[in-house]
Amino acid sequence: FTFGGTVVNLPPYITSKMISAFKQLDLGVIWKVNITSPDPSRIMTSKWIPQNDLLGHEKTKLFISHCGKNGQYEALYH
């Protein structure tokens, strides 16, 4: 899940709601964001993620993005 490079810091109440939603999923989540994950076994957070590599990974099931041009092209390719 990524907001791209335009959203650097999210307000705590939004971050909390996102984490709560992610915890309800039966999937692991990789989230590009500037916070430390409260549950690293289920939600991996990082300031930078190699998006193209992640999209090409065989276990990637869903890609949620801000729909920037590069992300769209990479998603279509994979």
Image (cartoon, rainbow, N blue to C red):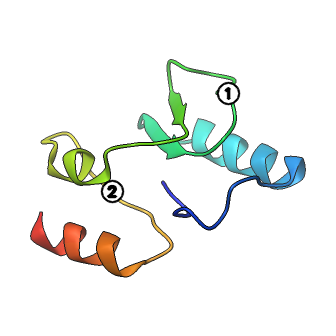
| Location of residue 72 with respect to 30 vertically, above or below | below
Determine the residue positioned at 62% across, 68% down: 6
In the rendered structure, the answer to whether residue 14 lies left or right of residue 70 reads: right
| Residue ranking furthest to the top | 41
User: SS at mark 1?
Assistant: loop
* Quadrant of image for the C terminus: bottom left
Residue 36's tag is 1
Determine the residue positioned at 55% across, 40% down: 47
**Is mark 2 in CB contact (under 8 Å) with mark 1?**
no
Disc number lying in front (2 or 1): 1
Of residues 25 and 5, the one nearer the viewer is 5
| Amino acid at dot 1 | Thr
Determine the residue positioned at 61% across, 45% down: 33
| Location of residue 9 with respect to 37 vertically, above or below | below
In the rendered structure, the answer to whether residue 71 lies left or right of residue 45 reads: left
| Amino acid at dot 2 | Leu
Q: Mark 2 points at which residue?
A: 62
Residue 46 place in picture, x, y as percent: 52, 35
Crowdedness of circle 2 by 10 Å Cα count: few (<14), some, many (20+)?
few
Residue 60's tag is none
Distance (Cα) linking label 2 and label 1: 22 Å
Of residues 16 and 3, the one nearer the viewer is 3
Residue 24 place in picture, x, y as percent: 59, 40
User: SS at mark 2?
Assistant: loop
Quarter location, residue 16? top right
Quarter location, residue 40? top right
In the rendered structure, the answer to whether residue 25 lies left or right of residue 61 reads: right
In the rendered structure, the answer to whether residue 6 lies left or right of residue 72 reads: right
**Going from the N terminus, do you reach mark 2 or mark 1 first?**
1
Crowdedness of circle 1 by 10 Å Cα count: few (<14), some, many (20+)?
few
Determine the residue positioned at 27% across, 51% down: 61
Residue 32 place in picture, x, y as percent: 52, 46
